[in-house]
Image: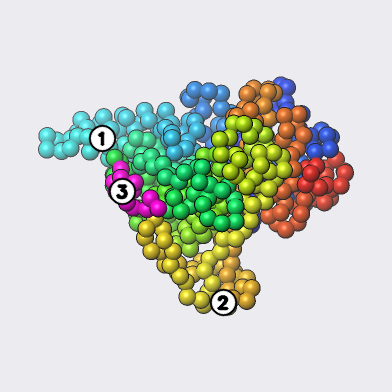
């Protein structure tokens, strides 16, 4: 895997808002640079930074505008890390429950829609004309904006490790024209073993919903084909915008959905988008995996990642993962997870998720591929490795290569109660304790590169086998 790190979009703000969290290593020694500490002990290669169009136009005090994100990206580059830029195409959070059009774009689209309606003849569909004008305007905006901001990062000397076009777009983006549907996974969270060695981790229940109800597919949802056409246009415009920028032509394009634990949900969005050519430009299919909200366990996660990697011939990554180190009383399913809600359980979760992603391979070359069930549809893996270098198989004949390329933790810097105030669920998903000391999970990331605790740490890392404070590094004291 070549993309190991975390979304540290709040770190710069956390350090600037007095009093900053007292970030320290697990031995209690204050870290001069929390980013470098995490990168060093965890073997990070990259960070993920979200970018909002104009957060000042939205409610709340979100710092993630272009100047802030450029500065954060510069700090990451100085630490020897690549940057994955997560474009939200919104002034605020974008996810399956909200994908608001940026205020400035909305005003421009509304003006274009009104002009189109006014020009429509008596026999024309005025509403259709309005919608078409809106989609055309937003598509142009996405393309131009994407090129503009990517150029800004390239000109600033940022080493882009990827550009994510949209955030968790399973339910579309740029609503309402790009809203698809809101499909909930039928898997019972109480049926999840959260990582056991057998079935019953939510995967069977999720797969069982298949295509039994046409309303569970975008075509059968209220938005229907028109919404899918719009989403495809927006995604293609974003991809075109990156390729038209000054970014190196091999900069990976990332398409990000949530629900890495539920194949029918993932397939319900990817299949019709692929039919419209909107998956082809992307190099990596990214997913989120938060066990509290995504009840399928590692078996279901593996099934989803492996199936989409083979079906679409793409690399896969987990762009957001997190697990709490405290607060088991807030988790109704915590007793059924294989990981305890504890510092040790959080570290075990990291190692298990990394193992899942490492296990994703394309089909063996020269070996007949089997068929898998994807939402009730037989999917025949074609064994396409995309022309990439393969490694020797371990005795099974043919050859294979890894398709799992990355894992990013969600907000490791979120320590509750300091300058930024209350954090999501008390900061219990952080990689630092409430007193600022690093947790064991911080070092567990090094397992992804087979280096053990303290391996890696970006380019030019020295002394990676020891804690930045100089003490011997072990997982119990990250």
Q: Quadrant of residue 35?
A: top right
Image vertical order of residue 71 relative to residue 247, above or below: above
Q: Classify mark 3: helix, strand or loop.
A: loop
Tell me the tag on residue 213: 3
Q: Classify mark 2: helix, strand or loop.
A: loop
Q: Is residue 309 magenta?
A: no
The residue lying toward the viewer, choosing from 93 and 27, is 27
Q: Tell me, yes or no, if residue 458 can be seen here.
A: no
Distance in Å between CA atoms under marks 3 and 2: 40 Å
The residue carrying pointer 1 sits among few (fewer than 14), some (14 to 19) or many (20 or more) residues within 10 Å by Cα, namely many
Residue 113, x across and y down, in percent: 28, 33
Q: How is the image coloured?
A: rainbow
Q: Give, as a single range, the part of the protein colored magenta.
A: 208-221
The nearer-to-camera label among 3 and 2 is 3
The residue carrying pointer 2 sits among few (fewer than 14), some (14 to 19) or many (20 or more) residues within 10 Å by Cα, namely some
Closer to the chain start, of discs 3 and 2, is 3
Residue appearing at x 64%, y 22% in the figure? 421
* Identity of the residue furthest to the right in this view: 471
From the image, tell me which residue sits under label 1: 130
Image quarter of the C terminus:
top right
Q: Classify mark 1: helix, strand or loop.
A: helix
Tell me the tag on residue 398: 2
Image vertical order of residue 212 relative to residue 21, above or below: below
Instruction: Specify whether 65 is left or right of 22.
Output: left
The residue lying toward the viewer, choosing from 302 and 249, is 302
Residue 205, x across and y down, in percent: 44, 50
Closer to the chain start, of discs 1 and 2, is 1
Residue appearing at x 49%, y 68% in the figure? 384
């Amino acid at each position: 895997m070549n993309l190991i790190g975390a979304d540290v979009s709040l770190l710069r703000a956390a350090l600037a808002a007095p009093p900053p969290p007292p970030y320290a290593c697990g031995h209690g020694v204050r870290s001069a640079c929390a980013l470098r500490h995490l990168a060093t002990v965890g073997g990070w290669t990259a960070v993920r930074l979200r970018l909002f169009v104009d957060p000042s136009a939205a409610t709340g005090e979100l710092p993630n505008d272009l100047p802030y994100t450029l500065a954060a990206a510069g700090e990451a580059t100085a630490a020897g890390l690549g940057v994955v830029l997560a474009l939200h195409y919104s002034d605020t959070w974008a996810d399956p429950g909200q994908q608001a059009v940026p205020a400035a774009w909305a005003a421009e689209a509304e003006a274009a829609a009104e002009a189109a309606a006014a020009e429509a003849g008596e026999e024309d569909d005025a509403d259709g004309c309005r919608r078409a004008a809106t989609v055309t305007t937003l598509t142009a905006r996405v393309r131009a904006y994407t090129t503009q901001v990517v150029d800004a990062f390239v000109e600033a000397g940022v080493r882009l490790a990827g550009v994510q076009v949209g955030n968790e777009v399973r339910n579309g983006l740029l609503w309402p024209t790009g809203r698809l549907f809101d499909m909930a996974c039928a898997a019972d969270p109480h049926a999840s073993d959260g990582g056991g060695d057998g079935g019953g981790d939510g995967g069977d229940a999720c797969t069982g919903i298949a295509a039994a109800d046409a309303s569970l597919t975008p075509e059968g949802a209220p938005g229907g084909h028109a919404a899918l056409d719009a989403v495809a246009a927006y995604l293609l415009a974003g991809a075109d915008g990156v390729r038209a920028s000054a970014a190196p032509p091999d900069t990976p394009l990332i398409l990000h959905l949530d629900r890495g634990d539920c194949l029918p949900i993932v397939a319900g969005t990817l299949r019709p988008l692929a039919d419209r050519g909107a998956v082809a430009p992307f190099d990596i299919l990214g997913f989120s995996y938060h066990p509290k909200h995504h009840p399928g366990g590692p078996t279901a996660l593996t099934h989803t990642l492996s199936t989409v990697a083979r079906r679409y011939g793409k690399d896969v990554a987990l762009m957001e993962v997190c697990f709490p180190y405290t607060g088991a009383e807030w988790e109704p399913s915590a007793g059924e997870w294989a990981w305890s809600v504890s510092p040790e359980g959080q570290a075990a979760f990291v190692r298990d998720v990394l193992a899942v992603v490492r296990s994703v391979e394309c089909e063996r070359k020269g070996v007949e591929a089997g068929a898998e069930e994807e939402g009730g549809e037989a999917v025949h893996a074609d064994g396409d490795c995309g022309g990439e270098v393969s490694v020797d198989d371990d005795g099974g004949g043919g050859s294979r290569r890894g398709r799992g390329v990355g894992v990013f933790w969600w907000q490791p810097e979120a320590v509750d109660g300091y300058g930024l105030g209350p954090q999501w669920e008390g900061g219990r998903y952080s990689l630092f304790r409430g007193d600022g000391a690093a947790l064991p999970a911080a070092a567990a990331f090094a397992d992804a590169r087979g280096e053990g605790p303290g391996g890696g740490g970006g380019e030019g890392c020295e002394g990676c086998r020891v804690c930045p404070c100089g003490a011997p590094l072990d997982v119990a004291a990250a």
